[in-house]
Image: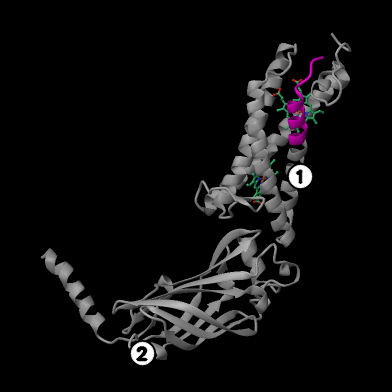
Amino acid sequence: MKRYTTTAIVLHWLMALLILAMLTLGHYMHDLKLSPLKLQLYSYHKWAGVSLLLLAVLRIVWRLTHKPPELVLPCWQQVASSSVHGLLYLLFIAMPLSGWLMSSAKGIQTIWFGLIPLPDMVEKNEALGHLLGKVHGSLSSLLLLLIGLHIAAALKHQFIDRDQLLSRILPGKSSKGKLP
Amino acid sequence: MNMIKIALPALLLFASSVQAVEYGTFQMNQSALNFAYKQMGVPMQGKFKQFSAQIAFDPAKPGNARAHIDVNLASIDTGSTDANEEVAGKLWFDAKTYPLASFVSSGVKAAGGNNYQVSGKLSIKGKTLDIVTPVTIKTDGKRAIIDGSFNIKRLAYGIGTGEWADLSTVADDVQIVFHLIVFAAPVIPSSTH
Ligand code: HEM
Ligand code: HEM
Protein backbone atom coordinates (compact mmCIF):
# COMPACT_ATOMS: atom_id res chain seq x y z
CA MET A 1 0.00 0.00 0.00
CA LYS A 2 1.31 3.44 -0.95
CA ARG A 3 2.38 5.64 1.90
CA TYR A 4 2.24 9.32 2.74
CA THR A 5 5.41 11.33 2.14
CA THR A 6 7.93 11.33 4.97
CA THR A 7 7.21 15.02 5.57
CA ALA A 8 3.49 14.29 5.96
CA ILE A 9 4.24 11.38 8.30
CA VAL A 10 6.59 13.43 10.47
CA LEU A 11 4.11 16.32 10.65
CA HIS A 12 1.24 13.93 11.46
CA TRP A 13 2.95 12.32 14.43
CA LEU A 14 4.69 15.43 15.71
CA MET A 15 1.42 17.35 15.73
CA ALA A 16 -0.51 14.37 17.13
CA LEU A 17 1.85 14.19 20.11
CA LEU A 18 1.87 17.94 20.68
CA ILE A 19 -1.90 18.24 20.41
CA LEU A 20 -2.53 15.43 22.89
CA ALA A 21 -0.01 17.07 25.25
CA MET A 22 -1.73 20.45 24.79
CA LEU A 23 -5.17 19.05 25.56
CA THR A 24 -3.85 17.45 28.73
CA LEU A 25 -1.80 20.47 29.74
CA GLY A 26 -4.69 22.86 29.02
CA HIS A 27 -7.03 21.08 31.43
CA TYR A 28 -4.35 20.44 34.03
CA MET A 29 -3.14 24.04 34.20
CA HIS A 30 -6.68 25.44 34.15
CA ASP A 31 -7.53 23.48 37.30
CA LEU A 32 -4.40 24.50 39.22
CA LYS A 33 -4.73 27.14 41.89
CA LEU A 34 -2.81 30.32 41.17
CA SER A 35 0.92 29.67 41.67
CA PRO A 36 4.21 30.34 39.87
CA LEU A 37 3.85 26.87 38.32
CA LYS A 38 0.46 27.83 36.90
CA LEU A 39 1.85 31.01 35.35
CA GLN A 40 4.78 29.05 33.89
CA LEU A 41 2.53 26.36 32.43
CA TYR A 42 0.23 28.98 30.89
CA SER A 43 3.25 30.49 29.14
CA TYR A 44 4.51 27.11 27.92
CA HIS A 45 1.00 26.24 26.70
CA LYS A 46 0.85 29.49 24.76
CA TRP A 47 4.33 29.05 23.28
CA ALA A 48 3.65 25.46 22.22
CA GLY A 49 0.24 26.50 20.87
CA VAL A 50 1.78 29.18 18.67
CA SER A 51 4.36 26.64 17.47
CA LEU A 52 1.46 24.36 16.55
CA LEU A 53 -0.11 27.19 14.54
CA LEU A 54 3.08 27.43 12.48
CA LEU A 55 3.23 23.64 12.06
CA ALA A 56 -0.42 23.70 10.95
CA VAL A 57 0.30 26.30 8.27
CA LEU A 58 3.27 24.23 7.07
CA ARG A 59 1.18 21.09 7.06
CA ILE A 60 -1.70 22.67 5.14
CA VAL A 61 0.68 24.09 2.53
CA TRP A 62 2.28 20.64 2.19
CA ARG A 63 -1.14 18.96 1.93
CA LEU A 64 -2.31 21.38 -0.80
CA THR A 65 0.82 20.74 -2.85
CA HIS A 66 1.05 16.97 -2.25
CA LYS A 67 -1.98 14.78 -2.90
CA PRO A 68 -2.25 11.89 -0.43
CA PRO A 69 -1.63 8.43 -1.90
CA GLU A 70 -4.65 7.05 -3.66
CA LEU A 71 -7.07 4.98 -1.61
CA VAL A 72 -10.30 3.20 -2.51
CA LEU A 73 -12.83 3.23 0.30
CA PRO A 74 -16.58 2.69 0.49
CA CYS A 75 -18.41 5.90 -0.26
CA TRP A 76 -19.58 6.57 3.34
CA GLN A 77 -16.06 6.12 4.66
CA GLN A 78 -14.74 8.47 2.01
CA VAL A 79 -17.23 11.12 3.12
CA ALA A 80 -16.67 10.47 6.82
CA SER A 81 -12.89 10.56 6.63
CA SER A 82 -12.69 13.66 4.48
CA SER A 83 -15.17 15.48 6.77
CA VAL A 84 -13.24 14.56 9.91
CA HIS A 85 -9.88 15.41 8.32
CA GLY A 86 -11.29 18.73 7.03
CA LEU A 87 -12.60 19.66 10.48
CA LEU A 88 -9.30 18.68 12.06
CA TYR A 89 -7.42 21.00 9.70
CA LEU A 90 -9.88 23.79 10.58
CA LEU A 91 -9.27 23.22 14.29
CA PHE A 92 -5.48 23.20 13.78
CA ILE A 93 -5.95 26.89 12.95
CA ALA A 94 -8.97 27.77 15.10
CA MET A 95 -7.57 26.33 18.35
CA PRO A 96 -4.39 28.42 18.52
CA LEU A 97 -6.09 31.47 17.01
CA SER A 98 -8.81 31.47 19.68
CA GLY A 99 -6.10 31.06 22.34
CA TRP A 100 -4.11 33.97 20.98
CA LEU A 101 -7.17 36.24 20.78
CA MET A 102 -8.29 35.18 24.26
CA SER A 103 -4.90 36.09 25.71
CA SER A 104 -5.06 39.52 24.08
CA ALA A 105 -8.60 40.11 25.32
CA LYS A 106 -7.52 39.09 28.82
CA GLY A 107 -4.72 41.65 28.63
CA ILE A 108 -1.88 39.13 28.73
CA GLN A 109 0.12 39.43 25.57
CA THR A 110 1.68 36.35 24.02
CA ILE A 111 5.46 36.60 23.73
CA TRP A 112 6.55 33.49 21.85
CA PHE A 113 9.27 31.73 23.89
CA GLY A 114 9.68 35.02 25.73
CA LEU A 115 11.29 36.49 22.62
CA ILE A 116 8.83 37.35 19.87
CA PRO A 117 5.79 39.41 20.88
CA LEU A 118 2.67 38.60 18.90
CA PRO A 119 0.51 41.62 18.12
CA ASP A 120 -2.68 41.96 20.15
CA MET A 121 -5.40 41.84 17.52
CA VAL A 122 -8.15 42.71 19.99
CA GLU A 123 -8.08 45.19 22.83
CA LYS A 124 -8.27 44.18 26.46
CA ASN A 125 -11.93 43.41 27.17
CA GLU A 126 -13.00 41.24 30.08
CA ALA A 127 -16.30 40.02 28.57
CA LEU A 128 -14.65 39.17 25.25
CA GLY A 129 -11.82 37.40 27.06
CA HIS A 130 -14.34 35.29 28.95
CA LEU A 131 -16.23 34.48 25.74
CA LEU A 132 -13.07 33.53 23.85
CA GLY A 133 -12.09 31.32 26.78
CA LYS A 134 -15.40 29.48 26.37
CA VAL A 135 -14.81 29.23 22.61
CA HIS A 136 -11.29 27.87 23.16
CA GLY A 137 -12.63 25.31 25.65
CA SER A 138 -15.53 24.23 23.37
CA LEU A 139 -13.25 23.90 20.36
CA SER A 140 -10.92 21.75 22.43
CA SER A 141 -13.84 19.42 23.29
CA LEU A 142 -14.76 19.18 19.61
CA LEU A 143 -11.12 18.47 18.79
CA LEU A 144 -10.99 15.70 21.39
CA LEU A 145 -14.19 14.16 19.98
CA LEU A 146 -12.85 14.21 16.41
CA ILE A 147 -9.53 12.71 17.51
CA GLY A 148 -11.50 9.95 19.26
CA LEU A 149 -13.43 9.20 16.06
CA HIS A 150 -10.23 9.38 14.02
CA ILE A 151 -8.35 6.93 16.23
CA ALA A 152 -11.37 4.61 16.43
CA ALA A 153 -11.53 4.56 12.63
CA ALA A 154 -7.81 3.85 12.35
CA LEU A 155 -8.11 0.99 14.82
CA LYS A 156 -11.14 -0.40 12.98
CA HIS A 157 -9.13 -0.47 9.75
CA GLN A 158 -6.23 -2.11 11.51
CA PHE A 159 -7.96 -4.77 13.58
CA ILE A 160 -11.37 -5.32 11.98
CA ASP A 161 -10.86 -4.61 8.30
CA ARG A 162 -7.19 -5.64 8.53
CA ASP A 163 -6.50 -3.55 5.44
CA GLN A 164 -3.05 -2.13 6.38
CA LEU A 165 -4.40 1.42 6.05
CA LEU A 166 -2.47 2.42 9.14
CA SER A 167 0.83 1.62 7.43
CA ARG A 168 0.16 4.56 5.07
CA ILE A 169 0.94 6.96 7.91
CA LEU A 170 3.42 4.88 9.93
CA PRO A 171 7.13 5.42 9.65
CA GLY A 172 9.20 2.53 8.35
CA LYS A 173 9.79 0.66 5.16
CA SER A 174 7.23 0.88 2.40
CA SER A 175 4.94 -2.15 2.57
CA LYS A 176 4.82 -2.66 -1.19
CA GLY A 177 3.81 -6.15 -2.19
CA LYS A 178 2.05 -7.01 1.07
CA LEU A 179 -1.26 -5.91 -0.37
CA PRO A 180 -2.52 -5.24 -3.86
CA MET B 1 -24.32 85.83 23.24
CA ASN B 2 -22.12 82.92 22.29
CA MET B 3 -19.08 85.08 22.60
CA ILE B 4 -19.95 85.92 26.18
CA LYS B 5 -20.57 82.27 27.02
CA ILE B 6 -17.08 81.39 25.91
CA ALA B 7 -15.29 84.53 26.99
CA LEU B 8 -16.59 84.68 30.53
CA PRO B 9 -15.23 81.34 31.83
CA ALA B 10 -11.99 81.95 29.94
CA LEU B 11 -11.61 85.29 31.67
CA LEU B 12 -12.34 83.80 35.06
CA LEU B 13 -9.82 81.06 34.45
CA PHE B 14 -7.22 83.62 33.48
CA ALA B 15 -8.01 85.78 36.47
CA SER B 16 -7.68 82.93 38.93
CA SER B 17 -4.47 81.58 37.42
CA VAL B 18 -2.57 84.76 38.03
CA GLN B 19 -3.49 84.82 41.71
CA ALA B 20 -1.43 82.87 44.17
CA VAL B 21 -3.40 79.79 45.07
CA GLU B 22 -2.77 76.82 47.22
CA TYR B 23 -3.97 73.46 45.97
CA GLY B 24 -5.25 71.20 48.65
CA THR B 25 -8.48 69.42 47.76
CA PHE B 26 -7.74 65.95 46.49
CA GLN B 27 -10.07 64.56 43.83
CA MET B 28 -10.14 60.78 44.16
CA ASN B 29 -12.44 60.13 41.21
CA GLN B 30 -10.20 61.93 38.72
CA SER B 31 -6.94 60.54 40.03
CA ALA B 32 -5.29 57.23 39.23
CA LEU B 33 -2.75 54.99 40.86
CA ASN B 34 -1.44 52.35 38.46
CA PHE B 35 1.39 49.88 38.50
CA ALA B 36 3.30 47.92 35.90
CA TYR B 37 5.42 44.81 36.19
CA LYS B 38 6.50 41.76 34.22
CA GLN B 39 5.04 38.29 34.53
CA MET B 40 6.86 35.57 32.58
CA GLY B 41 8.50 38.41 30.67
CA VAL B 42 5.12 39.85 29.64
CA PRO B 43 4.38 43.49 30.57
CA MET B 44 1.33 43.64 32.84
CA GLN B 45 -0.65 46.50 34.30
CA GLY B 46 -2.92 47.00 37.24
CA LYS B 47 -4.35 49.69 39.48
CA PHE B 48 -5.53 50.53 42.95
CA LYS B 49 -9.13 51.63 43.06
CA GLN B 50 -9.13 53.26 46.50
CA PHE B 51 -6.59 55.63 47.90
CA SER B 52 -6.68 58.97 49.64
CA ALA B 53 -4.29 61.86 49.65
CA GLN B 54 -3.63 64.98 51.64
CA ILE B 55 -1.67 67.27 49.44
CA ALA B 56 -0.73 70.90 49.84
CA PHE B 57 1.03 72.65 46.99
CA ASP B 58 1.67 76.33 46.45
CA PRO B 59 3.48 76.98 43.14
CA ALA B 60 5.12 80.02 44.72
CA LYS B 61 6.61 77.92 47.54
CA PRO B 62 7.19 74.39 46.18
CA GLY B 63 9.66 73.66 48.98
CA ASN B 64 6.78 73.75 51.45
CA ALA B 65 4.69 71.23 49.55
CA ARG B 66 3.51 68.20 51.47
CA ALA B 67 1.91 64.93 50.51
CA HIS B 68 0.50 62.04 52.47
CA ILE B 69 -1.04 59.24 50.48
CA ASP B 70 -2.77 56.16 51.84
CA VAL B 71 -3.55 53.25 49.59
CA ASN B 72 -6.17 50.63 50.39
CA LEU B 73 -4.24 47.53 49.33
CA ALA B 74 -7.33 45.32 49.15
CA SER B 75 -8.65 47.59 46.39
CA ILE B 76 -6.03 46.27 43.98
CA ASP B 77 -7.15 45.37 40.49
CA THR B 78 -4.66 43.13 38.69
CA GLY B 79 -7.10 42.30 35.90
CA SER B 80 -8.14 38.91 37.30
CA THR B 81 -10.20 37.97 40.35
CA ASP B 82 -7.92 35.04 41.18
CA ALA B 83 -4.87 37.25 41.25
CA ASN B 84 -6.67 39.98 43.25
CA GLU B 85 -7.47 37.47 45.99
CA GLU B 86 -3.96 36.03 45.89
CA VAL B 87 -2.15 39.35 46.26
CA ALA B 88 -4.32 40.41 49.19
CA GLY B 89 -3.14 37.23 50.93
CA LYS B 90 -0.34 36.59 53.42
CA LEU B 91 2.49 35.98 50.94
CA TRP B 92 1.83 39.25 49.11
CA PHE B 93 0.35 42.29 50.87
CA ASP B 94 -1.15 40.49 53.85
CA ALA B 95 -3.87 43.12 53.60
CA LYS B 96 -5.70 41.87 56.70
CA THR B 97 -2.72 42.73 58.91
CA TYR B 98 -1.44 45.67 56.85
CA PRO B 99 -4.48 47.16 55.09
CA LEU B 100 -2.76 50.39 54.03
CA ALA B 101 0.37 51.35 52.19
CA SER B 102 1.39 54.93 52.79
CA PHE B 103 3.67 57.53 51.37
CA VAL B 104 4.69 60.54 53.41
CA SER B 105 6.76 63.22 51.73
CA SER B 106 9.80 64.60 53.49
CA GLY B 107 11.04 67.10 50.94
CA VAL B 108 10.23 68.70 47.60
CA LYS B 109 12.88 70.22 45.37
CA ALA B 110 12.22 72.30 42.26
CA ALA B 111 13.94 70.77 39.23
CA GLY B 112 13.19 73.40 36.58
CA GLY B 113 9.90 74.25 34.88
CA ASN B 114 7.07 72.04 36.07
CA ASN B 115 9.47 69.43 37.36
CA TYR B 116 10.13 68.54 40.97
CA GLN B 117 11.94 65.88 42.96
CA VAL B 118 9.86 64.52 45.78
CA SER B 119 11.47 62.41 48.45
CA GLY B 120 9.70 60.60 51.22
CA LYS B 121 9.00 57.39 53.01
CA LEU B 122 7.04 54.56 51.49
CA SER B 123 5.62 52.05 53.95
CA ILE B 124 4.21 48.73 52.82
CA LYS B 125 3.58 45.58 54.86
CA GLY B 126 5.30 47.01 57.93
CA LYS B 127 8.49 48.05 56.11
CA THR B 128 9.43 51.67 55.53
CA LEU B 129 11.96 52.67 52.89
CA ASP B 130 13.11 55.99 51.45
CA ILE B 131 12.15 56.76 47.89
CA VAL B 132 12.69 59.66 45.53
CA THR B 133 10.41 60.28 42.60
CA PRO B 134 10.39 62.82 39.80
CA VAL B 135 7.09 64.65 39.58
CA THR B 136 5.60 67.12 37.13
CA ILE B 137 2.94 69.49 38.41
CA LYS B 138 0.80 71.53 36.05
CA THR B 139 -1.51 74.12 37.49
CA ASP B 140 -4.25 76.16 35.85
CA GLY B 141 -5.54 78.13 38.81
CA LYS B 142 -8.34 75.65 39.42
CA ARG B 143 -6.48 72.43 39.80
CA ALA B 144 -3.02 70.99 40.03
CA ILE B 145 -2.30 67.93 37.90
CA ILE B 146 0.44 65.86 39.47
CA ASP B 147 2.12 63.12 37.44
CA GLY B 148 5.05 60.89 38.13
CA SER B 149 6.38 57.39 38.39
CA PHE B 150 9.04 55.51 40.28
CA ASN B 151 10.23 51.93 40.65
CA ILE B 152 10.30 49.75 43.70
CA LYS B 153 11.66 46.26 44.29
CA ARG B 154 8.78 44.19 45.58
CA LEU B 155 10.98 41.82 47.57
CA ALA B 156 12.49 44.74 49.49
CA TYR B 157 9.03 45.06 51.08
CA GLY B 158 8.46 41.32 51.33
CA ILE B 159 5.71 41.45 48.71
CA GLY B 160 5.34 38.02 47.17
CA THR B 161 7.38 35.73 49.40
CA GLY B 162 7.55 31.93 49.65
CA GLU B 163 7.01 30.27 46.28
CA TRP B 164 6.48 33.72 44.74
CA ALA B 165 10.01 34.87 45.61
CA ASP B 166 11.05 33.28 42.30
CA LEU B 167 11.75 36.39 40.24
CA SER B 168 11.68 34.63 36.88
CA THR B 169 7.91 34.29 37.17
CA VAL B 170 6.96 37.68 38.63
CA ALA B 171 9.74 40.25 38.29
CA ASP B 172 11.14 42.21 41.25
CA ASP B 173 10.75 45.62 39.60
CA VAL B 174 7.38 47.26 39.93
CA GLN B 175 6.73 50.64 38.41
CA ILE B 176 4.28 52.84 40.28
CA VAL B 177 2.56 55.47 38.13
CA PHE B 178 0.47 58.17 39.75
CA HIS B 179 -1.82 60.83 38.36
CA LEU B 180 -3.27 63.03 41.08
CA ILE B 181 -5.74 65.87 40.73
CA VAL B 182 -5.84 68.44 43.49
CA PHE B 183 -8.26 71.36 43.37
CA ALA B 184 -7.69 74.76 44.79
CA ALA B 185 -9.96 75.65 47.67
CA PRO B 186 -12.91 76.06 47.97
CA VAL B 187 -14.01 72.49 48.08
CA ILE B 188 -15.69 71.25 44.95
CA PRO B 189 -18.23 68.52 45.56
CA SER B 190 -16.97 65.29 44.07
CA SER B 191 -18.35 61.80 44.15
CA THR B 192 -22.04 61.12 44.60
CA HIS B 193 -21.66 57.98 46.66
C1 HEM C 1 -3.94 14.21 18.01
C2 HEM C 1 -4.03 13.14 17.27
C3 HEM C 1 -4.19 13.10 15.77
C4 HEM C 1 -4.52 14.05 14.86
C5 HEM C 1 -4.84 15.51 15.15
C6 HEM C 1 -4.54 13.45 13.55
C7 HEM C 1 -4.84 14.08 12.38
C8 HEM C 1 -4.83 13.51 11.13
C9 HEM C 1 -5.16 14.16 9.89
C10 HEM C 1 -5.58 15.61 9.76
C11 HEM C 1 -5.03 13.25 8.89
C12 HEM C 1 -5.33 13.50 7.43
C13 HEM C 1 -4.12 13.50 6.56
C14 HEM C 1 -4.56 13.87 5.14
O1 HEM C 1 -4.64 15.06 4.87
O2 HEM C 1 -4.81 12.97 4.33
C15 HEM C 1 -4.62 12.03 9.49
C16 HEM C 1 -4.39 10.84 8.81
C17 HEM C 1 -4.24 9.63 9.42
N1 HEM C 1 -4.13 9.42 10.80
FE1 HEM C 1 -4.15 10.74 12.23
N2 HEM C 1 -4.21 12.11 13.71
C18 HEM C 1 -4.00 11.89 15.04
C19 HEM C 1 -3.67 10.70 15.64
C20 HEM C 1 -3.66 9.50 14.98
C21 HEM C 1 -3.48 8.21 15.61
C22 HEM C 1 -3.23 8.00 17.11
C23 HEM C 1 -3.56 7.29 14.63
C24 HEM C 1 -3.45 5.80 14.71
C25 HEM C 1 -3.98 5.09 15.67
C26 HEM C 1 -3.77 7.98 13.37
C27 HEM C 1 -3.90 7.38 12.15
C28 HEM C 1 -4.02 8.05 10.97
C29 HEM C 1 -4.05 7.38 9.68
C30 HEM C 1 -3.99 5.90 9.44
C31 HEM C 1 -4.17 8.38 8.73
C32 HEM C 1 -4.20 8.18 7.21
C33 HEM C 1 -5.59 8.10 6.71
C34 HEM C 1 -5.54 7.76 5.26
O3 HEM C 1 -4.81 6.82 4.92
O4 HEM C 1 -6.19 8.42 4.47
N3 HEM C 1 -3.84 9.33 13.64
N4 HEM C 1 -4.51 12.20 10.87
C1 HEM D 1 -3.59 23.40 19.24
C2 HEM D 1 -3.44 24.31 20.12
C3 HEM D 1 -4.13 24.38 21.47
C4 HEM D 1 -4.84 23.43 22.15
C5 HEM D 1 -5.14 21.99 21.74
C6 HEM D 1 -5.28 24.04 23.38
C7 HEM D 1 -6.05 23.41 24.34
C8 HEM D 1 -6.48 23.99 25.51
C9 HEM D 1 -7.30 23.35 26.51
C10 HEM D 1 -7.85 21.94 26.43
C11 HEM D 1 -7.50 24.24 27.50
C12 HEM D 1 -8.32 24.06 28.78
C13 HEM D 1 -9.68 24.61 28.53
C14 HEM D 1 -10.53 24.67 29.76
O1 HEM D 1 -10.19 24.05 30.78
O2 HEM D 1 -11.54 25.38 29.71
C15 HEM D 1 -6.80 25.45 27.15
C16 HEM D 1 -6.76 26.58 27.94
C17 HEM D 1 -6.07 27.73 27.58
N1 HEM D 1 -5.39 27.96 26.41
FE1 HEM D 1 -5.11 26.65 24.93
N2 HEM D 1 -4.82 25.34 23.42
C18 HEM D 1 -4.12 25.58 22.27
C19 HEM D 1 -3.49 26.73 21.90
C20 HEM D 1 -3.44 27.88 22.67
C21 HEM D 1 -2.75 29.09 22.32
C22 HEM D 1 -1.96 29.32 21.03
C23 HEM D 1 -2.94 29.97 23.34
C24 HEM D 1 -2.45 31.38 23.50
C25 HEM D 1 -1.57 31.98 22.77
C26 HEM D 1 -3.73 29.30 24.34
C27 HEM D 1 -4.11 29.87 25.53
C28 HEM D 1 -4.86 29.22 26.49
C29 HEM D 1 -5.19 29.82 27.75
C30 HEM D 1 -4.78 31.21 28.24
C31 HEM D 1 -5.96 28.87 28.43
C32 HEM D 1 -6.53 29.01 29.84
C33 HEM D 1 -7.89 29.56 29.83
C34 HEM D 1 -8.38 29.75 31.25
O3 HEM D 1 -7.81 29.17 32.18
O4 HEM D 1 -9.36 30.45 31.40
N3 HEM D 1 -4.02 28.03 23.91
N4 HEM D 1 -6.19 25.27 25.93
- How many other residues sit within 10 Å of disc 1, few (<14), some (14-19) or many (≥20)? few
The overriding secondary structure of the stretch rendered in magenta is helix
Amino acid at the residue labelled 1: Thr
Residue range in magenta is A1-16
Which sits in the foreground, B138 or B87? B138
Q: Are marks 1 and 2 in contact (CB under 8 Å)?
A: no
Does label 1 point to a residue whose CB lies under 8 Å from ligand 2?
A: yes
Above or below residue A142? Residue B54 is below
Does residue B66 sit above or below A132 in this rendering?
below
Q: Which residue type carries mark 2?
A: Lys
Residue at horizontal 53%, vertical 49%? A120
Residue B165 visible in rendering: yes
- Image coordinates of residue A168 in percent, x first then y, are 80, 20
| Callout 2: CB less than 8 Å from ligand 2 | no
Q: Residue A85 location in percent, x, y?
A: 69, 25
Q: Position of residue B135 (x, y in %)?
A: 44, 77
Q: Is residue B189 visible?
A: no
Quadrant hosting ligand 1:
top right
